[in-house]
């Protein structure tokens, strides 16, 4: 009798302890879930609902053996069928096409052997939707993105952002375009609107992707492939009609910079960049496109003879990469850098080294005899409102961000990336406009810092900014002269190239969302090595 009572009491006690414990566990799990938006919000009614899965795959990229890649497979759960455009026989993810103000849900499933998360490059979304590495999910887990499209129409993109392995995962194939459609009916559309994702890769003799090979120098300068892939495929050409085209160009390479130009010497007609259309088309002899950047190019091919080929090339330029004692183009150093191709096992072309700044043919457009749609180039687009700098809180004393090399690391103001760290000088106020100045190659690094110098493509998450000044007085003359006509400092941007010695001032406004966002070098090897920091928007 007494015994059973004791048993009962024990049971009750156990229940009393265990139930709350369970509830607590459950609760903390749920809290984690809701704060990480792992699950679907019932009250969110998406216009477009997509399932996107990152998974290893094998694709027929080259002749012979298949290539092991990572890819985003996708499925449209809800929405117009044009919202998801697959690219056959490519490792690239689908092109996601949305319209301004649409509500988007993306159910991201990670089937990779590594952790991962997706960043929507260029989009203005809440911090937990932005793909910060602290939100990574593991194999078998799901992360549900739900956000409203509130950017201008334009060419954006998405790619993984797990810390330390972003370069590897993007290289393996994880990337896709995210197009916000405009209602400009007077621009080439449908088959005359062609995405061009430019990437460089390196293959071994059994058609497998080669990455870094643990080569310290490759890490330092960033990965450079010796074969160009367009839209995740190895074809080097496409057939075009005699028509007017709109090319949405993304530099999706890990670290290669392109100096884009038409082979027939015709100027590039640029109609847009990172954040959408410019206020009017602008003509450039060539365009410098750093990793992560986009340009929208208009081209009339209607007057080209059938059978003729027009190539999109990358012209030679001086990237200004100097590795101090290890290779500044002279003496022992130059030998080490430049001679790398020769140091390879044999003279096989697939082992050749193509430096950043070496000339390349990217893609050939073969003009057919088919007469296609011809539309005239609009003389102007919507005006772009310039920031009023007198309203900025620090016009006369911009925040400064020095991208430099020190202690064998690429750093920002002497700091490397820490997952949750935000320094005092990285805190900004919601609803303010600021001026930020980015400096490349500055002090701080002492002798070594000055000797190791490279261009850095600077990317800021969460917003689009305006470039207000590019000070080139400290850029080596040979470097600047080889690139000076290729920059567009108009319109809205989220990524810009900061050459050695360059100082760039940008104006940015922090709106709508508080929280922690990243800014970093979009040379993905530099990013993975820690040339990345958080900034925080506070109330
Ligand atoms: Cu396209 Cu933080 O990156
Ligand atoms: Cu960099």
Image (cartoon, rainbow, N blue to C red):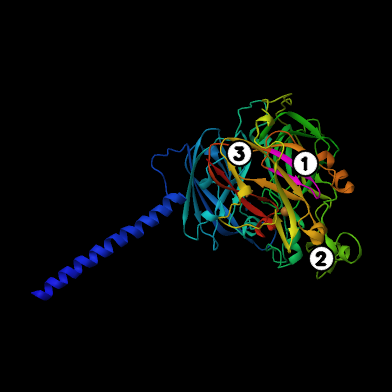
- Say whether residue 87 is visible: no
Secondary element type, mark 1: strand
> Is 8 placed above or below 234 here?
below
Q: Main SS of the magenta segment?
A: strand
| Residue 501 falls inside the magenta stretch | yes
Secondary element type, mark 3: strand
Distance, label 1 to label 2, CA atoms, is 29 Å
Nearer the viewer's eye, disc 3 or disc 1?
3
Distance, label 3 to label 1, CA atoms, is 26 Å
The numbered mark, 2 or 3, whose residue comes first in the sequence reads 3
Q: Nearer the viewer, residue 181 or 277?
A: 277
Secondary element type, mark 2: loop
Image-based side of 103 in relation to 163, left or right: left
As drawn, the label of residue 21 is none
**Badge count:** 3
As drawn, the label of residue 179 is 3
Nearer the viewer's eye, disc 1 or disc 2?
2
- Say whether residue 525 is visible: yes
> Is 530 placed above or below 285 here?
below
Quadrant of the drawing holding the N terminus? bottom left
| Residue 29 falls inside the magenta stretch | no
Q: Position of residue 284 (x, y in %)?
A: 81, 35
Distance, label 2 to label 3, CA atoms, is 39 Å
**Residue at 83 percent of width and 59 percent of height:** 451
Callout 3 crowding tier (Cα within 10 Å): few <14, some 14–19, many ≥20:
many
Q: Position of residue 470 (x, y in %)?
A: 78, 40
Residue at numbered disc 1 = 366
Q: Nearer the viewer, residue 518 or 209?
A: 518
Q: Nearer the viewer, residue 353 or 80?
A: 353
Magenta-tinted stretch: 495-506
């Amino acid at each position: 009798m007494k015994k059973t009572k004791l048993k009962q009491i024990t049971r009750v006690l156990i229940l009393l302890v265990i139930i709350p414990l369970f509830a607590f566990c459950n609760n903390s799990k749920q809290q984690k879930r809701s704060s990480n938006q792992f699950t679907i919000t019932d009250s969110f009614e998406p216009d477009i609902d997509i399932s996107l899965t990152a998974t290893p795959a094998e694709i027929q990229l080259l002749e012979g053996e298949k290539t092991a890649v990572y890819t985003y497979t996708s499925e449209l759960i809800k929405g117009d069928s044009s919202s998801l455009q697959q690219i056959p026989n490519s490792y690239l993810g689908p092109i996601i096409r949305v319209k301004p103000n649409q509500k988007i849900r993306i159910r991201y499933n990670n089937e990779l052997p590594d952790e991962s998360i997706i960043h929507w490059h260029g989009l203005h979304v809440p911090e937990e939707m932005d793909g910060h590495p602290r939100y990574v999910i593991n194999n078998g887990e799901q992360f549900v993105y739900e956000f409203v499209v509130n950017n201008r129409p334009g060419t954006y993109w998405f790619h993984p952002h797990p810390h330390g392995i972003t370069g590897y995962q993007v290289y393996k194939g994880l990337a896709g375009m995210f197009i916000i459609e405009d209602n400009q009916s007077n621009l080439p559309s449908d088959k005359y609107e062609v995405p061009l994702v430019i990437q460089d890769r390196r293959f071994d003799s059994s058609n497998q992707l080669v990455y870094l090979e643990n080569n310290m120098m490759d890490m330092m300068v960033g990965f450079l492939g010796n074969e160009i892939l367009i839209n995740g495929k190895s074809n080097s050409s496409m057939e075009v009609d005699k028509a007017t085209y709109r090319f949405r160009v993304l530099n999706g390479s890990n670290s290669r910079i392109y100096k884009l130009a038409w082979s027939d010497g015709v100027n590039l007609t640029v109609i847009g960049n990172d954040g959408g259309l410019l206020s009017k088309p602008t003509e450039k002899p060539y365009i410098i496109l750093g990793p992560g950047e986009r340009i929208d190019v208009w081209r009339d091919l209607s007057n080209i003879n059938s059978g003729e080929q027009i190539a999109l090339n990358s012209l030679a330029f001086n990237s200004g990469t100097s590795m101090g004692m290890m290779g500044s183009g002279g003496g022992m150093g130059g030998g080490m850098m430049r001679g790398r191709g020769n140091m390879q096992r044999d003279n096989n072309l697939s082992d050749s080294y193509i430096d950043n700044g070496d000339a390349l043919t990217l893609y050939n457009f073969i003009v057919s005899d088919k007469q296609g749609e011809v539309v005239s180039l609009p003389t102007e687009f919507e005006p772009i409102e310039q920031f009023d700098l007198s309203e900025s809180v620090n016009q006369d004393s911009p925040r400064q961000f020095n991208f430099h090399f020190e202690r064998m690391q690429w750093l920002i103001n002497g700091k490397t990336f820490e997952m949750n760290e935000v320094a005092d000088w990285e805190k900004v106020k919601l609803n303010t406009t600021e001026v930020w100045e980015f400096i490349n190659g500055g002090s701080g690094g002492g002798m070594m810092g000055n000797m190791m110098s490279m261009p850095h493509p600077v990317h800021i998450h969460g917003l689009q900014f305006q470039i207000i000044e590019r000070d080139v007085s400290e850029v080596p003359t040979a470097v600047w002269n080889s690139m000076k006509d290729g920059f567009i400092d108009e319109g809205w941007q989220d990524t810009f190239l900061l050459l050695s010695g360059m100082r760039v001032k940008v104006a940015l406004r922090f709106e709508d969302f508080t929280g922690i966002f990243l800014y970093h070098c979009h040379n993905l090897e530099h990013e993975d090595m820690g040339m990345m920091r958080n900034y925080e928007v506070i109330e």
